[in-house]
Image (cartoon, helix red, strand yellow):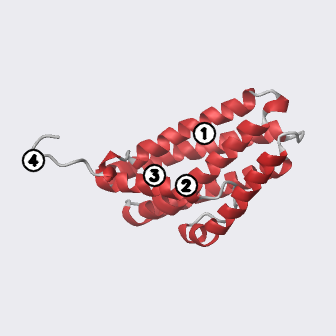
Amino acid sequence: MTEGRHPVPELMKEPDVVDLLIHQHGLIRDLFDEVERAAPGERREPFRRLVRMLAVHETAEEEIVHPYARRRVDGGAGIVEDRLREEHEAKRLLALLDRQGVDHPDFMANLDLLRVAVLAHARAEERYEFSRLRAEATAAERRAMALGVRAAQAMAPTRPHPGVESATKNLLFGPPAAIVDRARDLIRRATGR
C-alpha cells in the first residue's frame, strides 16, 4: 500500500443493490429453466433451489428495497404497492406448488403460471422501481442497500409466506418462519423428500 492511501472500506466493495437484484433475477430465470428441463424424477432438487431463491430474494426486497423506494423515490408508494400485489400472488402460487410437490399432475402447468408471474414482476421491478433507485439513490446508498439485502437473505425464510409482504411483517414473522423453514429443509434433506 502506498503512503497516504487508505484501504477501501468493505462497504465500498459491495455491489450496487440494483446490479445485485438484477443478477438474482437472471439466476431465477436460470432456475426456472433448470426445473423445466429436468426429467420428472429429477425436478425435486432444482425446484427446492428455486423456492429458496424466490423466498429469500423477495424477503430482502420487502425488508430493504421497497421501504427505501416507498419513502425516497418519486411516486414510490404506488410503485411499491404494485410490486407487493405481484409478490403476494407469486408467493401464493409458489406456496401451492411447494405444498403439492413436483409429482403433482398440475405441477408443470402451475410452474408455467408462476414463471410468467415472476418474470413479469421482475421486469416491472427493473423498469419502474430499480430504474428510479439507480437515478435517485446515491451510489453509497445503493451499496448500503446491497449489504442490507445480503444480510436479510442470510436470515430470511426459505419458503414462501403469502400475506407477509411488508418490512414490518417480515421483521416480526420472518425470524420464527426462517427457523421453521430451515428445520423443515434439514428434515426434507435427511429423509430425501
Q: Establish if 30 lies above or below 99.
A: above
- Earlier in the chain: of badge 2 and badge 4, it is 4
Q: Three-letter amino acid code at disc 3? A: Glu
- Residue 155 drawn above or below residue 24: below
Q: Which residue is denoted by mark 1 in the rendering?
A: 28
* Inter-mark Cα distance, 2 to 4: 36 Å
Where does the image place residue 13, in percent across and percent down from the top left?
33, 45
**Residue at 45% across / 51% down in the picture?**
129
- Check disc 1: other Cα within 10 Å, few if <14, some if 14-19, many if 20+: many
Q: Quadrant of the N terminus?
A: top left
Residue 182 pos. (x, y %) = 69, 56
SS category of the residue bearing label 3: helix
Sequence-wise, the earlier of marks 1 and 3 is 1
* Label 3 neighbour load within 10 Å: few <14, some 14-19, many 20+: many
> Which of marks 4 and 3 precedes in the sequence?
4
Residue 129 shows which numbered tag? 3
Q: Residue at x 49, y 57 (%)?
A: 151
Image coords of residue 150 (percent x, y): 48, 52
Amino acid at the residue labelled 1: Ile
Which residue in the structure is indicated by mark 2? 154
Please identify, in this view, whether the residue under mark 4 or under mark 1 is nearer the observer. 4
**Residues at marks 4 and 1, CA–CA distance in whole angstroms:** 44 Å
Q: Nearer the viewer, mark 2 or mark 3?
A: 2
Q: Secondary structure at mark 4?
A: loop
The residue indicated by pointer 4 is 4
